[in-house]
């Protein structure tokens, strides 16, 4: 699928922001006053900034508020409701830490639960899609959650949680790429099933269905060369997981911690680009743009 920059920014930064809010809700790090204000500012800039970036991909951003009414059937609507609830609860919790130096335990736990629920609902927007076999798998929400928790722990300075979570996320991402490469083929979807013509005989494409581009080709079909994808995968794994883990294992220094965060952010941006660019929508079969990548 077309890797829209707004959606890449949204899934990267909001995941980190809500991940940091999760750990703050649990009391890690245990900060109050100006220190708490600094951590909450970073978390809200990431979470809210990511959410705002997502609206740039909407055809009519001014109508986004209507999505909140569809929470019974839409994961997008559930994401919006969970995000607003998490931000409001964590604002009240953060105010207690900043202005009163008091941690309201139950409010922090509720905010942490809503924060991680927001990340889960975001993942389910993609995991529910039958038309994208690479995404329709348990590994999609698992990756969103581990990345959010690992990145959030990294931002919170919680090395004891960040190290195992980043290692787990890196291993899970490598496996998801390996398994996902054949998921479309294993799904049983072919040109015959995509066109609905299989019952009348063998189906093959001998001419493009359109002489020019259209919305489906722009948004749903994006072919990435195999060698290009392999290089980006290595870059994402090294920057997103391997280098931050190595830096966390070194004797602590603020500049090393900052470098670990920046490295992880760059790696997640790369793998988020791949998440969308490598997602083979079944409509691509109709246009002949399947796994025959260069």
Image (spheres, helix red, strand yellow):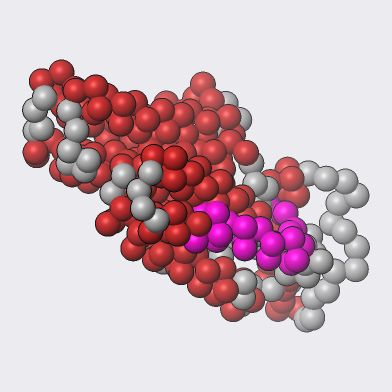
Q: Quadrant of residue 198?
A: bottom right
Q: Which residues are magenta?
A: 220-242
Q: Position of residue 101 (x, y in %)?
A: 11, 25
Total numbered badges shown on the rendered structure: 0
Which residue does the image show at 51% across and 21% down from the upper left? 62
Nearer-the-camera pick, 291 or 40: 40
Which residue does the image show at 74% across and 60% down from the upper left? 228
Q: Is residue 157 above or below residue 186?
A: above
The reply, left or right, for residue 238 in relation to residue 281 is: left
Q: Quadrant of residue 21?
A: top left
The reply, left or right, for residue 263 in relation to residue 19 is: right
Q: Position of residue 224 (x, y in %)?
A: 74, 59
Residue 221 within the segment the image draws in magenta: yes
Which residue does the image show at 50% across and 72% down from the upper left? 175
Q: Is residue 118 visible in the rendered structure shown here? A: no
Q: Is residue 31 visible in the rendered structure shown here? A: yes
Q: Quadrant of the C terminus?
A: bottom right
Which residue does the image show at 17% across and 38% down from the upper left? 30
The reply, left or right, for residue 227 in relation to residue 51 is: right
Q: Position of residue 203 (x, y in %)?
A: 79, 75
Residue lying at the far bottom of the rendered structure? 201
Nearer-the-camera pick, 241 or 294: 241
The reply, left or right, for residue 205 in relation to residue 265 is: right
Residue 134 within the segment the image draws in magenta: no
Most common SS among magenta residues: helix
Q: Position of residue 105 (x, y in %)?
A: 9, 38
Q: Is residue 240 above or below residue 53?
A: below
Nearer-the-camera pick, 275 or 163: 163
Q: Quadrant of residue 181?
A: bottom right
């Amino acid at each position: 699928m077309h890797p829209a920059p707004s959606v890449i920014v949204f899934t990267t930064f909001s995941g980190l922001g809500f991940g940091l809010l999760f750990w703050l809700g649990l009391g890690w790090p245990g900060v109050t006053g100006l220190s708490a204000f600094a951590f909450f500012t970073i978390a809200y800039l990431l979470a809210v900034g990511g959410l705002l970036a997502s609206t740039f991909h909407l055809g009519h951003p001014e109508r986004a508020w209507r999505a909140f009414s569809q929470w019974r059937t839409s994961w997008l609507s559930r994401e919006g409701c969970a995000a607003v609830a998490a931000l409001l609860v964590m604002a009240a919790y953060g105010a207690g830490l900043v202005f009163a130096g008091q941690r309201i335990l139950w409010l922090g736990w509720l905010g942490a639960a809503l924060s991680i629920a927001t990340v889960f609902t975001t993942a389910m927007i993609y995991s529910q899609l039958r038309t994208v076999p690479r995404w329709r798998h348990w590994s999609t929400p698992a990756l969103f959650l581990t990345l959010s928790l690992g990145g959030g722990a990294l931002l919170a300075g919680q090395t004891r949680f960040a190290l195992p979570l980043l290692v787990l996320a890196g291993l899970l991402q490598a496996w998801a790429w390996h398994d996902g490469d054949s998921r479309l083929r294993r799904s049983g979807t072919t040109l015959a099933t995509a066109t609905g013509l299989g019952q009348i005989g063998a189906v093959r494409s001998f001419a493009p269905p359109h002489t020019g581009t259209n919305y489906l080709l722009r948004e749903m079909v994006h072919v990435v060369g195999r060698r290009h994808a392999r290089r980006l995968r290595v870059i994402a794994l090294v920057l997103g997981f391997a280098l931050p883990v190595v830096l966390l294992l070194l004797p602590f220094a603020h500049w090393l911690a900052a470098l670990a965060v920046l490295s992880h952010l760059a790696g997640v941006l790369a793998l988020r680009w791949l998440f969308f660019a490598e997602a083979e929508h079944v409509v691509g079969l109709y246009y002949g743009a399947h796994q025959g990548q260069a």
